[in-house]
Image: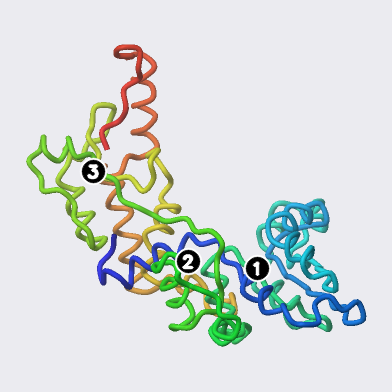
């Protein structure tokens, strides 16, 4: 629920997408010579992560049916980052792998992949900016793929990443939603949240709850997840995602967080914790300790959020 209603909500939805270029391009491989044994071809599918041990899962999820109906096409799965090659690396080396460089390597090498499966809009955006992807719109039109089967906001969200072009489709998506405790709003005589609210409006509304002191008996105005007590970095990532802010430049060599826009993100999240609008880990610990001593009617008390 962000400002610039449709535009930002689409970014929220797209932020949680499991993106895949697989489905439309597999359909595009269909032609009249699909059963011709003399026209055997190999379709190379790139993945962000994987290993030989993961192949059966990906084949079951995406390619088994296609292989069954296209006897002359062999599927080869190519991970950009191979888990089996990293298993003996130190945690630091595993975490410091340049994902974009690895993906570009399998997309531009001597035997590049035909299709790339990515797991975030961030990677999709980088590949679009690097001009590494082919627009799917002409292929979708040619093969008469019906996009009405997709949730419109999902398609719009992917188009927004691609500057109003489709460079990917997704078989699944993870939406975000804002839930609120209607009883607490009514009890405190505070107006209920409405659709299309901006981050600032949500936060200002949340600040009207509680006394800013925290603790086991406090009422908190907001939580970025249903469990409460998350860390500030995760909250910052979720808050900044629909704002279109980048942490690194296109080459992944320079950080871009020293800007007024990013400063507002840092200070906004820090302020939520300082004023106990969002429960801190210490707040949650006090609540859990109180729960262990105070069980009402056989059920543990839940924090007021």
Left or right of 213 in this view: 86: right
Neighbourhood count class around disc 3 (C-alpha, 10 Å): few under 14, some 14–19, many 20 upward = many
In the image, residue 76 above or below residue 134: above
In the image, residue 92 above or below residue 244: above
Which circle, 1 or 3, is nearer the viewer?
1
Residue designated by label 2:
149
Left or right of 294 in this view: 106: right
**Residue shown at 74% from the left, 64% from the top:** 81
Neighbourhood count class around disc 2 (C-alpha, 10 Å): few under 14, some 14–19, many 20 upward = few
How far apart marks 2 and 3 lie (CA) works out to 37 Å
User: What is the number of the mark on residue 101?
Assistant: none
How far apart marks 2 and 1 lie (CA) works out to 21 Å
**Residue shown at 68% from the left, 65% from the top:** 48
Residue designated by label 3:
221
SS at circle 1: strand
**Residue shown at 75% from the left, 58% from the top:** 59
């Amino acid at each position: 629920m962000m400002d610039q209603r449709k535009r930002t909500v689409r970014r929220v939805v797209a932020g949680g997408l499991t993106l895949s270029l697989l489905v439309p391009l597999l359909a595009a491989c269909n032609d009249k010579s699909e059963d011709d044994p003399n026209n055997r071809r190999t379709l190379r599918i790139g993945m962000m992560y994987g290993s030989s041990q993961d192949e059966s899962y990906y084949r079951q999820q995406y390619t088994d049916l296609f292989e069954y109906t296209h006897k002359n096409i062999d599927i080869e799965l190519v991970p950009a980052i191979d888990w089996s090659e990293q298993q003996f690396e130190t945690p630091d080396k595993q975490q410091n792998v340049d994902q974009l460089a690895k993906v570009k390597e399998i997309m531009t090498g001597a035997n590049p992949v035909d299709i790339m499966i990515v797991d975030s809009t961030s990677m999709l955006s980088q590949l679009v900016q690097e001009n590494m992807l082919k627009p799917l719109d002409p292929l979708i039109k040619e093969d008469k793929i019906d996009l009405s089967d997709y949730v419109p906001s999902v398609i719009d969200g992917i188009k927004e990443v691609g500057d109003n072009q489709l460079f990917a489709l997704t078989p699944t998506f993870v939406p975000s939603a804002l839930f609120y405790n209607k009883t607490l709003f009514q009890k405190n005589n505070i107006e209920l949240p409405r659709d299309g609210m901006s981050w600032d409006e949500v936060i200002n509304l949340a600040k009207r709850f509680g006394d800013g002191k925290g603790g086991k008996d406090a009422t908190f105005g907001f939580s970025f997840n249903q469990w409460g007590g998350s860390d500030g970095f995760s909250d910052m990532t979720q808050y900044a995602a629909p704002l279109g802010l980048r942490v690194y430049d296109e080459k992944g060599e320079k950080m871009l967080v020293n800007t007024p826009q990013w400063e507002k993100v840092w200070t906004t999240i820090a302020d939520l914790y300082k004023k106990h609008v969002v429960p801190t880990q210490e707040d949650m610990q006090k609540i859990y300790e109180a729960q262990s001593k105070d069980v009402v009617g056989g059920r543990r008390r839940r924090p007021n959020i």
